[in-house]
Amino acid sequence: MSRLSRFTLVAGAAALLSVSRRAALAQSPFTITGQTTTGTPTQATVSGSSVVDLVDHLIESQQDFSSFQNQAFNASLNYGAVPNAIQFQRNAAGTSATVTIPSTGFTRTFTGTSEADVRKKIEDFLVKEGAHEYAKFLKPSELANHARAAGLEMRDLTGMTYNPITKVYALGRDVDVNYILATRRG
């Protein structure tokens, strides 16, 4: 899967997960914990401020996840106070991978004849259908709770909609998928 595709996967979620700069600098907001499920038991926990880099290293079994090479594994991405925000599973051959977002009820298993084939299927999914899933990643009430925990006061919540027939974007009350949350320091 290309770096651009992995960015596409997490860009929407990361935009929704934004908190104040002060809170983000206080600690690394993203943590991935993974463990192998075949071969010699290995566990790795890695934190950072770039979810794209963390997921890239996990999927490619690189850097702190290099011991996961040619191993089946389970992994979980935590975001701040949101445990198990995204869960990953991969078989040892890389021919099957499952991505789960528990808060949305989303689970998808991708299978193929090779690791490259599975990555291509995931990339195609992300470009075509995946935006709707990660858009549901964090509900407005959850984002408001994170903002309050970061010392921010919620000022306004406005939904954004698009009508593909009239090709008109509008602001309104529907916050089911797209929304803007305005805050200020408390």
Image (cartoon, helix red, strand yellow):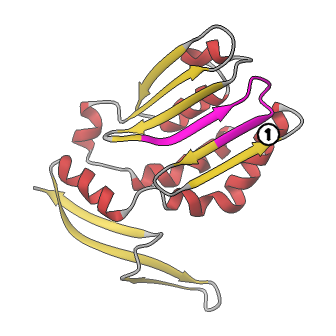
Residue 75 higher or lower than 145, as above or below: above
Residue found at the very far bottom of the displayed protein: 166
- For label 1, the SS is helix
Residue 120 higher or lower than 47, as above or below: below
Q: Residue 36, percent across and down?
A: 61, 19
Name the residue: 58% across, 64% down. 132
Q: Residue 57, percent across and down?
A: 59, 26
Q: Closer to the camera, 102 or 31?
A: 102
Q: Residue 14, percent across and down?
A: 45, 49
Q: Where does the N terminus fall, quadrant-wise?
A: top right
Name the residue: 48% across, 52% down. 13
Q: Tell me where residue 49 sits by quadrant.
A: top left
Q: Tell me where residue 59 sits by quadrant.
A: top right
Residue found at the very far right of the displayed protein: 113
Q: Which residue is mark 1?
A: 118
Query: Which stretch is magenta?
Result: 84-98
Name the residue: 33% across, 75% down. 158
Q: Residue 179, percent across and down?
A: 40, 70
- Around disc 1, counting alpha carbons within 10 Å, would you say few (fewer than 14), some (14 to 19), or many (20 or more)? many
Q: Amino acid at mark 1?
A: Val
Q: Tell me where residue 6 sits by quadrant.
A: top right
State left or right for residue 41 relative to residue 19: right
Q: Is residue 116 magenta?
A: no
Q: Closer to the camera, 162 or 38?
A: 38
Main SS category, magenta section: strand
Please tell me how many numbered marks the rendered image carries.
1
Q: Where does the C terminus fall, quadrant-wise?
A: bottom left
